Amino acid sequence: AQRVTQPEKLLSVFKGAPVELKCNYSYSGSPELFWYVQYSRQRLQLLLRHISRESIKGFTADLNKGETSFHLKKPFAQEEDSAMYYCALTNTGGFKTIFGAGTRLFVKA
Amino acid sequence: NAGVTQTPKFRVLKTGQSMTLLCAQDMNHEYMYWYRQDPGMGLRLIHYSVGEGTTAKGEVPDGYNVSRLKKQNFLLGLESAAPSQTSVYFCASTTQGGNQPQHFGDGTRLSIL
């Protein structure tokens, strides 16, 4: 069965510290993986996707097929990074997306 | 540049009442989705549509119905609201293809008393 697991409900770090939000997935095919972010009082929006191999707002994520993981990382957290982060997987054919339960990141001053 | 628009933004219902949530997108997207967001459970797919006139069940479809009579609109109906349906509802749309991101609306906060 398709599943996306984000083991941490809440992650609290100090400003300037590295941050890693974990995401593991279960999928038999070749997944398309995404990270979405929801800032306070804003709509859910795309942060990055694995196919683009890009860095957005200092965040990167590498797809590790061996470990079936897609962890989100940033070397130096900023207060404005405080938000809810969702890892998501889209199935082959692209018409259905499974979201993880989300991790709330709190960056302390 | 509206993107995905959801109406209403807030609503309080009594158990047993019915209502319809409207989602409209102006991006000519083929695929549209309804999710519910509950604490600790992330976003769960209720129903989705891959084109005008077609709908399909998602992960948690019971108690909901949908219609996609026009490509730009996707309606979510609650025929007989129950307290368990208290949630925040999000609509999303995307173009065809698995590597395309979904575009979300602002959400509808629905409380069932």
Image (spheres, coloured by chain):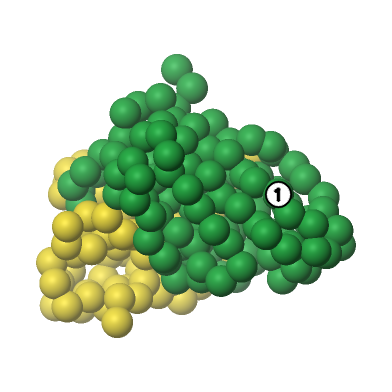
Left or right, A7 with reference to A97: right
| Residue A19: percent from left, percent from top | 42, 58
The chain ID associated with circle 1 is: B
| Residue A48: percent from left, percent from top | 30, 45
Count of numbered marks = 1
Element carrying mark 1: strand
- Viewer-side residue, B40 vs B92: B92
Amino acid at dot 1: Met
| Residue B70: quarter of image | top left
| Residue A98: percent from left, percent from top | 37, 64
Looking at the image, is A96 positioned above or below residue B63? Answer: above
What residue is shown at x 49% (from left), y 22% (from top)? Answer: B2
Residue A49: in sight, yes or no?
A: yes
Chain appearing in green on the rendered image: B
Query: Label 1 neighbourhood size at 10 Å, few (<14), some (14-19), many (20+)?
Result: some
| Residue B32: quarter of image | top left
What residue is shown at x 46% (from left), y 36% (from top)? Answer: B73
Left or right, A34 with reference to B1: left
Read off the residue under disc 1: B19
- Viewer-side residue, B10 vs B70: B70
Left or right, B98 with reference to B107: left
- Viewer-side residue, A17 vs B15: B15
Residue A63: in sight, yes or no?
A: no
What residue is shown at x 64% (from left), y 35% (from top)? Answer: B7
What residue is shown at x 70% (from left), y 49% (from top)? Answer: B19
Left or right, B102 with reference to A92: right
| Residue B76: percent from left, percent from top | 56, 50
Give the color of chain A as drawn: yellow
